[in-house]
Amino acid sequence: MTIAIMQPYFLPYIGYLQLMNTVDKFIFYDDVAFINRGWVNRNRILVNGKDFMLTVPLKEASQNKRIADIDLSDDPKWRQKLLQTLGQSYRKAPFYKTVYPLLEKIVNLEVRTIAELVRDSFPLINDYLGIQTELVPSSAIYNNHELRGQERILDICRQEKATRYINPIGGMELYDRQRFADAGIELFFIQSRRVDYAQFQNEFVPWLSIADVLMFNDVPTVQKMLDEFELV
C-alpha cells in the first residue's frame, strides 16, 4: 500500500495530480490549520498571457481554524464571477468546450466548506483523466490530533498499513528516512519535471493550475504528463 498525504488544494498544479496518480490512497490532510494566502482556496491561471491568482472566497478564514471547518463565502455571486474569469480567459483555448463544463460542475458543487469543494472536485477531475486512486479526508478517519508533524504522518501510515509513503520534494527537510524505515515504511519524495505546452501565442508560463493544463492539452497528452516526475 502506497499513500500520500496533502492538504486539499483547489485546482492545483499538475505535480499534485502526479502525486495522486502514483499512490494507492491519497489522503486530504484537512484537519490541520488553514494557512492564509496558501494554496487551499486559490491557484494560478493564465489571464492575458500572464499568471493570475484565481481565488475561492471564504467565510471567516483563520489560521486558528482547521481547513475542514472553513466555510465558503455566503456571497451567491462568487461562483458566477469565478466561472466568468475562467470563461473569458480560456474561451479560445483548444479544449475549452470539453473542459469548461467540467470546471463549471466543480465550481457549482453544492458543498459548504472549502475542504468539501476540493474533495468533491477530484472525482470529477480523476474520472476525466482516468485516475483511479482512492481518496479520503483525514478528518473522517484517523483521530490522532494529539500527534504533530512526522509522528502524525507515521501514525496515519501505520493505520493504513502502508509500506510506502510519497511526499512532495519540499518536505525533504521535514521527514527522516531512517525513522520511516524503522517503522517498516519506505519514504520517497516526488520531483516533478517541468512540462511545456502551447498557451495561445504567449511565452509559456509554467506550473499553472490543472485548469490551464486541461484547456490546452487533450487527455492522452495530460496522462503522459502525469508520468513526468522522478522519485528520490
Image (tube, rainbow, N blue to C red):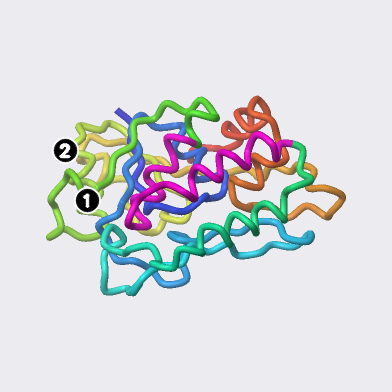
User: Looking at the picture, does residue 55 appear above or below residue 170?
Assistant: below
The residue nearer to you, when weighing 188 against 36, is 36
- In the displayed orientation, state which residue is furthest to the right: 201
Mark toward the viewer: 2 or 1: 1
Magenta residues (range): 95-124
First-in-chain label (2 vs 1): 1
* Residue at numbered disc 1: 139
The residue nearer to you, when weighing 51 against 154, is 51
Q: Position of residue 32 (x, y in %)?
A: 27, 61
The residue nearer to you, when weighing 162 against 75, is 75
Three-letter amino acid code at the position of disc 1: Ser
Side (left or right) of 152 relative to 202:
left
> At 50% from the left edge and 40% from the top edge, which residue is drawn?
17
SS at badge 2: helix
* Residue at numbered disc 2: 159
SS at badge 1: helix
C-alpha span from label 2 to label 1 = 14 Å
> At 46% from the left edge and 67% from the top edge, which residue is drawn?
57
> At 50% from the left edge and 36% from the top edge, which residue is drawn?
125
Q: Quadrant of the N terminus?
A: top left
Q: Let me know if residue 85 is in the magenta part.
A: no
Q: Position of residue 11 (x, y in %)?
A: 52, 50
User: How busy is the neighbourhood of tag 2: few (under 14 within 10 Å), some, or many (20 plus)?
Assistant: few
User: Looking at the picture, does residue 118 appear above or below residue 134?
Assistant: below
Three-letter amino acid code at the position of disc 2: Gln
